[in-house]
Image (cartoon, rainbow, N blue to C red):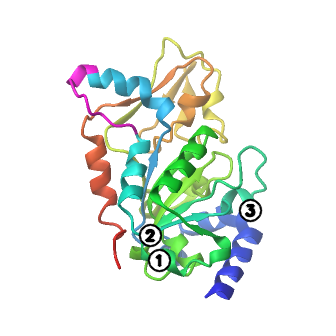
Amino acid sequence: MGLRTDLATRLIRSTFQQRYLVARMTQLPVAGKAIEFALFEKDAMIYLPRDDVVKRKVIQLEKEVGATNMVLPSQVIDHFLKRSRYIFIMNACMCRDSNHCHNYPHELGCIFLGKGVTKIPEKMGRRATPEEAIEHMRKARESGLVHLIGRNKIDSVWLNTGPKEDLLSICNCCQCCCLWKMLPEMNDTISTGVSRIPGLQVKVMEDRCTGCGACIKEEICFTRALSISNGKAHVDDLRCRGCGRCAEFCPNGAVELTLTDPEYFEKTVQKIDPLVDILAE
């Protein structure tokens, strides 16, 4: 098992820059079906923007709906960590290692939940308590990383953890190295497997937007959801995954993320919960 994972790890690192070619191949009828089945079958991943990007708008929503228990996006992660019987923290981020990232820490790797964790080689990381994992996630957010949570079949394949239903992935993503920079090149079936949290609205405030173009850079919006028209930025809701990078990097504070649904937490948990049995023996 360990040898197979070692070989898969070396293969991913050596071919990481060719991932866009693989993404484009998913557009081909036969090759696309084969790639989808092998690596992305029934994926369901959700981006969670950092708390500091949406916190002000959450407070505003609390006032509007009279909710006193409105939770922040990071608490979705905490919810699953506190419930899981199996937690594994990776020693390093495969994507940042493979892409030789100079912008974000390599040691803040993914966290995996579910019984598939028991098959991950010990040298790749360590089993952890919920408290240790929550602290790991806090450090990731403070370093500027964005969480992505859900079932990602490619993780169960390269880690050789068994059925995809046995492994829940929690990634700490940077905009420069994220595997899902492939999304604009992939077929619709695969790309729609990555989504934003329910009730998240991404809006450009035109009175603040100067059309500077900072938000449309590929290293900021890797899904190419933003464009400049008539001197103002515009968001394509079909492409946007709500990672919040545009709001984070806009020099004029012209992009706002608003949680419009006071039940977004419950709905997000309901989408993720059936994917993997994190309590299985």
Quadrant of image for the N terminus: bottom right
* Residue most extreme to the left: 66
Amino acid on which the number 2 mark rests in the picture: Tyr
Pointer 3 residue: 98
Amino acid on which the number 3 mark rests in the picture: Ser
Q: What is the spatial separation of the Cα atoms under label 1 and label 2, in whole angstroms?
A: 8 Å
Q: What residue span does the magenta drawing correspond to?
A: 63-72
Specify few, some or many for label 1: CA neighbours under 10 Å numbering under 14, 14-19, or 20 or more: many
Specify few, some or many for label 2: CA neighbours under 10 Å numbering under 14, 14-19, or 20 or more: many
Pointer 2 residue: 86
Residue 35 to residue 108: above or below? below
Amino acid on which the number 1 mark rests in the picture: Gly
Q: Secondary structure at mark 3?
A: helix
Q: What is the spatial separation of the Cα atoms under label 1 and label 3, in whole angstroms?
A: 23 Å
Contact? badges 1 and 2 (CB < 8 Å)? yes
Quadrant of residue 160 within the rendered picture:
bottom right
Nearest-to-viewer mark from 1 and 2: 2
Q: Position of residue 110 (x, y in %)?
A: 57, 59
Residue 229 to residue 142: above or below? above
Q: Is 195 positioned to the left or the right of 182 in the image?
A: left
Front residue of 214/279: it is: 279
Q: Is 6 positioned to the left or the right of 57 in the image?
A: right
Res 208 visible: yes
Among numbered discs 1 and 2, the one appearing first in the sequence = 2
Pointer 1 residue: 116
Residue 139 to residue 99: above or below? above
Res 223 visible: no
